[in-house]
Amino acid sequence: MIIPNRFNDQVALVTGAGSGIGLGISRRIALEGGTVIMADIDGAALDAARDTIGDVPGTLRGSVLDITEEADTRDLMRDTVERHGKLDIAVNCAGIVGPSAANIAEYDLSSFRKVLDVNLVGSFIVTKYAINAMLPAGYGRILLLASISGKEGNPGMAGYSTSKAGVIGLTKAIGKEYAHSKITINALAPAMISTPLAQSLDPDKLSLLTDKIPMGRLGTIDEVAAFACWIVSPEASFNTGAIFDLSGGRATY
Ligand SMILES: NC(=O)c1ccc[n+]([C@@H]2O[C@H](COP(=O)([O-])OP(=O)(O)OC[C@H]3O[C@@H](n4cnc5c(N)ncnc54)[C@H](O)[C@@H]3O)[C@@H](O)[C@H]2O)c1
């Protein structure tokens, strides 16, 4: 249920906003009155995403960004503060799966490095410059995307599982670093959500991962956006360094 005006006067930067979860979160923040800088490596996807959102009370602006490029990410955060006066919210949804059915004996090293670079190093870069953009105002909400595979380990997906375990460690460490500020840093650990990323998985792996969900279905983008928007709202003021499950009952710890 949309909460009108919840993000009025708030400025958000969402990466991976051209598709899936990032698009869903961008849409919901703008529907609730926020200004959203939608960043993605894929400019065509960003244009299409903007069209699917349609008219919203908030403001949407697209920006092509590769989150593994440190200087570009820093510049986009600085530009956001220069244009809008502040950055209240950063949500890092940019991510890739890499190989999804390759045991380590066949897992290509360059693929492993690439998955860690986007999912883990990218999370580091986005968080570092989001924090720097938020510190002067003394307020912020940072949300990273981990995955249940970072807790349990999905066989055949060593790069992805390792990168998401890294995002969990990163969130826990930096949540404590800034606990005395009003900047919170949290992560979501979803099970399979129905997005283009899920459809890119090896079909047998997708069916196996769906079967592991006690609710017997994939999560929806709207379910993720609803939860994410509470975590990045001013109301979520006593949560930091937390890994929030969103798994239809799959998560057991
Ligand atoms: N869909 C799921 O089942 C699921 C489950 C758990 C976690 N997650 C995580 O949620 C996040 C979003 O997943 P999704 O399902 O929406 O994926 P998606 O593939 O639909 O969207 C990911 C977006 O990230 C962009 N991207 C990729 N590399 C980038 C880079 N270097 N810089 C900037 N943008 C880049 C892509 O262009 C794409 O638009 C990912 O981190 C993913 O690992 C997804």
Image (cartoon, grey):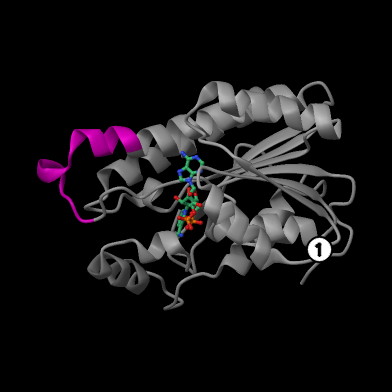
Question: In terms of image quadrants, where is residue 205?
Answer: bottom left
x, y percentage for residue 79?
74, 28
Point 66% across, 56% down: residue: 25
x, y percentage for residue 47?
61, 55
Q: Is residue 141 left or right of residue 96?
A: right
Q: Work out whether residue 115 can be spotted.
A: yes
Which residue type carries mark 1? Val
The image shows a total of numbered marks equal to: 1
Q: Is residue 244 rendered magenta in the image? A: no
Point 31% across, 67% down: residue: 206
Element class at badge 1: loop
Point 29% across, 41% down: residue: 159
Q: Which residues are magenta?
A: 101-114
Q: Quadrant of the N terminus?
A: bottom right
Considering the whole magenta stretch, tell me its main secondary structure.
helix
| Residue 215, above or below 88 | below
**Residue lying farthest to the bottom in this orientation:** 216
Question: In terms of image quadrants, where is residue 18?
Answer: bottom right
Residue indicated by mark 1 = 56
Question: In terms of image quadrants, where is residue 32?
Answer: bottom right
Distance from mark 1 CB to nearest ligand 1 atom below 8 Å = no
x, y percentage for residue 48?
59, 60
x, y percentage for residue 252?
43, 59
Q: Work out whether residue 244 can be spotted.
A: no
Q: Nearest the camera: 155 or 99?
A: 99
Q: Is residue 104 rendered magenta in the image? A: yes
Q: Is residue 72 left or right of residue 54?
A: left
